[in-house]
Image: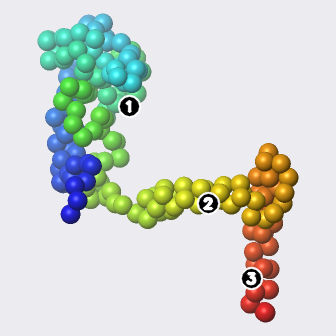
Amino acid sequence: MSELPWDEYEEGDYENACRKCEIEIIISDQKALSEVRSCMQYDKKNKGLRGRGMMRDLPKFGLLAGDRLEPGPLLDDVGKLDKIRLFPFVLLFWRTTLETITKHRNPLFNSEIGVDPYKVMAIDPLHDIHLGVLARFVVFCLWTFLNADIFQVGGSNKDRPLLSTRMTRLIILNFGNIILVFLVN
């Protein structure tokens, strides 16, 4: 068998990768929340944290610069961090330096209810062939036919694709009648 350009994963690898990166901290009061927030800012650059994260270490909470605040069971939107008023409160951080096969936990995958990516993800013809390679091939063929003026509509290079497209539409709309003519003869 030839070498594949990607790694093969086993059941539990996704969950282990997520657990390795996740850090839960308990915020006991408003003062602790202010202390954590003072070390954070948004960094949405592609090579950055891609969210709201720590800009410097905060050893008191076990947080390092580069740790990113993540949505969790109690905080579904990291933008709502400033609105927390009930304490104690659990915040979920993601240690970006330990990322391996995933950059975030997907909320749809939950092994406790049996929705593990290893069990529910599958390669299917619709997404891999019909909406992928085959769709691109069909588009390529159509443009090749239109540019070759297969219906001999003539006209300038600018008008030919529009005229050929109209002819293609007529054929598609009358497809049933065309088939009947061939079947009868």
Q: How many residues crowd around disc 2 within 10 Å: few (fewer than 14), some, or many (20 or more)?
A: few
Vertical order, 87 against 34 (above or below): below
Secondary structure under the numbered disc 2 in the rendered image: helix
| Circle 3/circle 1 CB separation < 8 Å | no
Secondary structure under the numbered disc 1 in the rendered image: loop
Residue 165 sits in quarter: bottom right
Please indicate whether residue 160 sits to the left or right of residue 130 in the image. right
Applied colour scheme: rainbow
Which residue lies under the disc numbered 3? Answer: 179
Whole-percent x, y for residue 174 in the image: 80, 73
Which residue lies under the disc numbered 2? Answer: 141
Vertical order, 65 against 129 (above or below): above
- Residue at horizontal 74%, vertical 90%? 183
Q: Quadrant of the N terminus?
A: bottom left
Please indicate whether residue 32 sits to the left or right of residue 152 in the image. left
**Amino acid of disc 2:** Cys
Whole-percent x, y for residue 75 in the image: 35, 28
Mark in the foreground, 3 or 2: 2
Relative to the observer, which residue lies in front, 78 or 15?
Answer: 15
Which residue lies under the disc numbered 1? Answer: 76
- Furthest toward the bottom, the residue is 185
Q: Which mark is residue 176?
A: none
Residue 58 sits in quarter: top left
- Residue at horizontal 23%, vertical 9%? 56
Relative to the observer, which residue lies in front, 67 or 159?
Answer: 159
Secondary structure under the numbered disc 3 in the rendered image: helix
Mark in the foreground, 1 or 2: 2
**Amino acid of disc 3:** Ile
